[in-house]
Image (cartoon, rainbow, N blue to C red):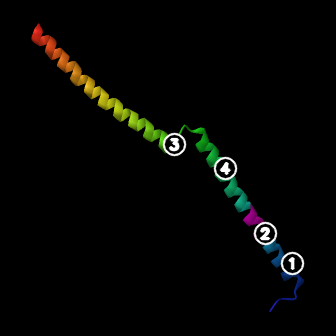
Amino acid sequence: MQSENPFIADFVKMMNSAAGTFAGMTREARDTAKERFKELMGDMDFVSREEFDAVKDMAATAREETETLKKQVAALEAKLSAKG
């Protein structure tokens, strides 16, 4: 049963308006925080997963080549030591 009291009706309208305003402020604050976070993350020098994996593969290849070269140098040094 609704009240016929104008004071209560005005109070309910005011509370509904306040709730709507608060919900709008909450959405706006959330959206602003999201944008700030995106800007903060955008300013940092992060790399994508693809770039990371590519560099990781390049490093692994370089390590393998280094090991091969170390073995070749050791073999050449052994040859030189055997001759001298």
Graded by Cα atoms within 10 Å as few (under 14), some (14 to 19) or many (20 or more), the crowding at tag 2 reads: few
Contact, mark 2 vs mark 1 (Cβ under 8 Å): no
Please name the residue that numbered disc 1 is placed on. 10
Is the N terminus in the top left, top right, bottom left or bottom right quadrant? bottom right
Disc 1 residue type (three-letter): Asp
Residue hosting label 4: 35
Residue 21 located within the stretch drawn in magenta: yes
Quarter holding residue 67: top left
Q: Position of residue 53 (x, y in %)?
A: 43, 41
| Residue segment shown in magenta | 18-24
Question: Which residue is at a point 83% across and 76% down the rendered structure image?
Answer: 13
Label 2 element class: helix
CB contact under 8 Å: marks 3 and 4:
no
Of callouts 4 and 2, which one flags the residue occurring earlier in the amino acid sequence? 2
Instruction: Check disc 3 and report the residue beneath it.
Output: 48
Task: Measure the C-alpha gap from mark 2 to mark 3.
Answer: 44 Å
Badge 2 is on which residue? 18
Where disc 3 sits, the SS reads: loop
* Outermost residue toward the top in this view: 84
Based on the picture, tell me whether residue 37 belongs to the magenta stretch.
no
Q: Secondary structure at mark 4?
A: helix
